[in-house]
Amino acid sequence: MEPVLIFGHKNPDTDSICSSIALAELKKKTGLEAIPCRLGELNKETKYVLNKFKIKEPKLLKTVSAQISDLTKVEKKTLSTSDSLRVALDIMSNENFSSLPVINNKKELKGMIYISDIANTYLNLKHSDLFSKYTTSYENLKRVLKGEIVSGNYPCGVIEGNLKAISELDEVLQGDIVVTTSMADGIDRSIKAGAKVIIVACDKNDFISPRVTSECAIMRVHANLFETISLISQSLSISSLINKNKFYSFKTDEFLDDIKDIMKEATQTNFPVTNKDGSVYGTIRTKNLINFTRKKVILVDHNEKSQSVDGLQDAKILEVVDHHKFGNFFTDEPLKIKAETVGSTCTIVYDLFKENNIKPSKEIAGLMLSAIISDTLMFKSPTCTKKDMETVAELSKISAIEDYEKYGMDMLIAGTSTSDLSSFEILVADLKEFTMNGLKIAVSQINTVDIDGVLEKQKDLEKTMEENNTNNEYKLSLLLITDIINSGSYALIIGENKEIVERAFEVKIKNNLVWLEGVVSRKKQVVPFLMAASQNI
């Protein structure tokens, strides 16, 4: 059973990461296999927290788009290079395939065989070419003919001699294979000429007297001469007919969205799929792409598609745990939603632990405590509630962090140094995208104690924001540079609709910059005001 993937928003912050890890731990303790994931690189604050509690980084999840391995219908039929054309024809006719992948003894893909290849071979085939132009084995020959060995030792391995018919008895050479009737003269002459195998086409009631010879094997076939030669042609090995033309093949981890156009435009109808080790996984057709098993996911600390993982439309959302507003959120199936107006998702996750009568480990309690302090800016954010503070007090006892205020300040300071960050890293470290009255707007935030250090990069930040606006079609970008000591934010504004900011906060922007007194929460103090102001554009 595939595990459930739990993840927060893109450009993850500490709450996003810690809530995914904590909730995954809770799910495991309730019997559900779950894996915490991240949708981007970790910031310094989050790394500080994970290092503090010796927790491994969640795995990076780039997409939950459906892959070939998720398909519910994959044809598993293959042909071996040593199989006969008879085997190929039987499978193709029974399964209604026009082509099949051919594998070697290691199950590696060696090529494709098409029904047209077989048909063209038959149309141009001369019985004298059977073993000179094409290869097969003695085993295939006997199996296809359903022959009975009545005398001599039947050989094994690849056939090296030529095929001679009853009319060519005078031309039989050492090692040849002769197909004849039950005429005694034909059999004896072939033995004397050094034939390796004599195939006798005869009625079931015809008697063939055994010859005492080990050099030549005599095989009786219950068919007439014409039928026997036709069957011999079906004993040719697949390796003789593998089409050398190029064909499309895929790997199990390729995404359906990436291959569907290739499949529509290709001339072939069947497409081999290989595993990572090169072995053949199966064959797919265009119609197989309709049905696939959707990856099961739980969203934490977000619910909007623009902030979530790529390919979310292909996934099955089981649950949402969040403390943000719900916007543009809809699903085609019922799901569980746990949402509260608190300052951190981890406050909600801790509630879920208590609802299930499960006590979190010391390390997980430390993660949740860190996330709440981070998201509420040490309880200074207007999003902070009494419940957040009570939760931190409870978690401090479990995690053995008695002086959580000192720990919290150390954590915030550790995560706010920007000296080693580029302008782009500052901009996208915590960027969220919103659509307001048809306008795409980006709001980034960085919490710091080094306001001057960030403002020194203003010109470079402005250039980076302009480029980011162009690349993502943002009409407006805000970078909130939040002073966690003085409880306020500088807003750096770049874009076409700056009047939205001026109207939202009743300020005048000078040099693309404005101080917003007491504003520390993007969710509660910025986004709602921008949305209201944008309605008058």
Image: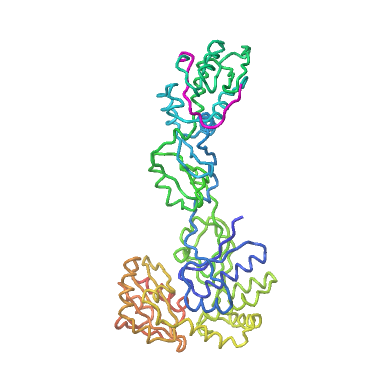
List x then y, in percent, for residue 481: 40, 81
**Does the magenta portion include 162?**
yes
Q: Which residue lies furthest to the right in this view?
A: 357
* Quadrant in the rendering for residue 220: top right
Q: How many numbered discs? A: 0
Magenta stretch prevailing secondary structure: loop
Image quadrant in which the N terminus is located: bottom right
Foreground pick, 474 / 213: 213
Residue shown at 59% from the left, 59% from the top: 3
Q: Tell me: 304 left or right of 423.
A: right
Q: Tell me: 318 left or right of 500.
A: right
Foreground pick, 4 / 307: 4
- In the depicted structure, whether residue 278 falls above or below residue 394: above
* Quadrant in the rendering for residue 452: bottom left
List x then y, in percent, for residue 42: 48, 73
- In the depicted structure, whether residue 168 falls above or below residue 464: above
* Colour scheme: rainbow
- In the depicted structure, whether residue 150 falls above or below residue 451: above
List x then y, in percent, for residue 468: 34, 69
The residue segment tinted magenta is 152-168
